[in-house]
Amino acid sequence: MLGLDSLPPSVLYEDMDGGGFTYIRRLIEEGQKWLMRTCHPPITVPAWMVMFTGKTPGELGIYGFRHRRPGEFDYYIVNSSFIKTPTLWDDAGKKGLKVGVYGVPPTYPPRLVHGFMVTDFTTPGPDKPYTFPPWLRRELESRTGPTVFDIVYRSHDKDRVARDLFHMLENHLRQVEYLATRKQWDLFVYVEISVDRAHHAFWKYFDKNHPRYEYHPMYSSVIPKVYKRIDEWFEKLHRRLPKDTIIVVASDHGVKPMKGAFTINQWLIEQGYLKLKEDTTTLKPGTDLRRDLIDWEHTIAWAWGGYYSRVFINLKGREKQGAVDPKYYEETLRQLKRDLERIRGPNGERWDNKAYTPQELYPEVRGDAPDLMVYLDDLWWRPAGTIGWQTNYLPENDRGPDDAVHDWLGVLAVYDLEDTLPKGFMGEIRAEKVKEFIEQLIYQ
Amino acid sequence: MVHKDMTEKVSIEIKRDLYDKAKKFIEEQGGFSSVEELVEFLLEEVLSSEESEERGLSKEDEEKVKERLRALGYI
């Protein structure tokens, strides 16, 4: 299973690959194509684990990289120990299959598997024990060099970003090729994060529909080159695999141009939901919302930015200086939802905003869920959590340049030389059904 | 508090050819006095992180990840 993080259907199915995926697209044309409808929220953590456990983010209790314990202001980061449900590879191992897992977020710290595992970009560093079995790390490094987990891609130094990106990609391809050809496995799951990093750093040079599209002799070719490199590598590898190997190409969500960022906490301040101790105009643009800046006694709600926004109610009895009486909690949520959904664009245009309580989205809500999950203009606008800006509408991300936002549809395509599957376009499959779908392929 | 008898042993079965390979290795290379000792050692090695009370990230590692995610612009 080749996981290409954030690959949208337009690239794999509709010719928007800049000529990159020649081989893989030819394979898929002879196979089965699905649109993979990602989870709420449509982000890498938790999307891959939803696909590999068959559980919704609510059931997993994972709503992003970071979470907040009730009553605390700071956040903690999730890791593999938060995944309490058996994954596709855990169940396959139990059935006697040998498994290989590479780069699936979040798999650090690595767990015991019936095979081998190399962890993902959430690994603290290459000096950490990031493989299973533990001694695989040395073996891998001696043959392929030090492992590269991620790059700093939100940077204006695009030359460096491109260099680092290809360096990381080559590192991963070498390692996966080594593992796939030297180790025994029945199921190999490989997620490549470079695709997502290329999209975020170079999408405006690639997608002609981007509102800030710009042709650049070098940067415009980065994304197609990433696709091409993966495609050529995969063709070579595929020819070395047993003929009856089933190939699955999947992504965790799609991607589309970012129209801009909306300063969600500034809006909460304007609407009277959030009160600061000092005048916001005295703050530097891009100031983090800190606990000590907030006038908690008069604050109803505050928010986090990201690809989606998480809104927290300053609930009495739960928060340290809670101000909202529990008997007004539901009413406050309803009012806030209505107001959030009415936010309009910079020119007064109507936006397609959605604000959900986790209970509306999931059959079960575990872990540290926010009170509201908010998408602005169907994800076209990124919520920015920082404050001190002159306007609520920023042309760029508040955390460094980013050309792309996420989208609801990813891909799931299957190629089986033995021709046991119906071919062609099959419609939509939900992220939490992917595990069951792959299990049917394995155990058919 | 009841302490488990740490010296109590149980029997498990492994493939003959794997056992023979391990036995040959020990006879030629040393390092372990028996196949049982080698198996116990390997199991302890791979299970040590799984049974740790604080499975997951240490405070220091969590800070490292936060720093990286911040540099990456995630948070």
Image: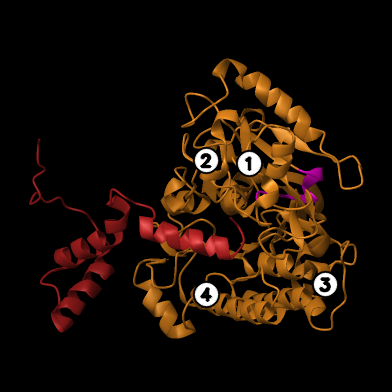
Residue A12 appears in view: yes
Q: Which mark is residue A65?
A: none
Outermost residue on the top side: it is: A327
Instruction: Identify the image quadrant of residue A279.
Output: top right
Chain assignment, label 3: A
- Disc 3 marks which residue? A205
Pair 1/4: label in front: 1
Magenta range:
A376-386
Tell me where residue A91 appears, x and y as whole percent.
47, 48
Cα distance in 3D space between marks 1 and 4: 33 Å
- Disc 4 marks which residue? A148
Chain assignment, label 4: A
Q: Are marks 1 and 4 on the same chain?
A: yes
- Disc with the residue nearer the chain's start (1 vs 3): 3
- Disc 2 marks which residue? A60
The secondary element bearing badge 4 is classed as loop
Specify the chain shown as orange.
A
Q: A34 or A377, which lies in front?
A: A377
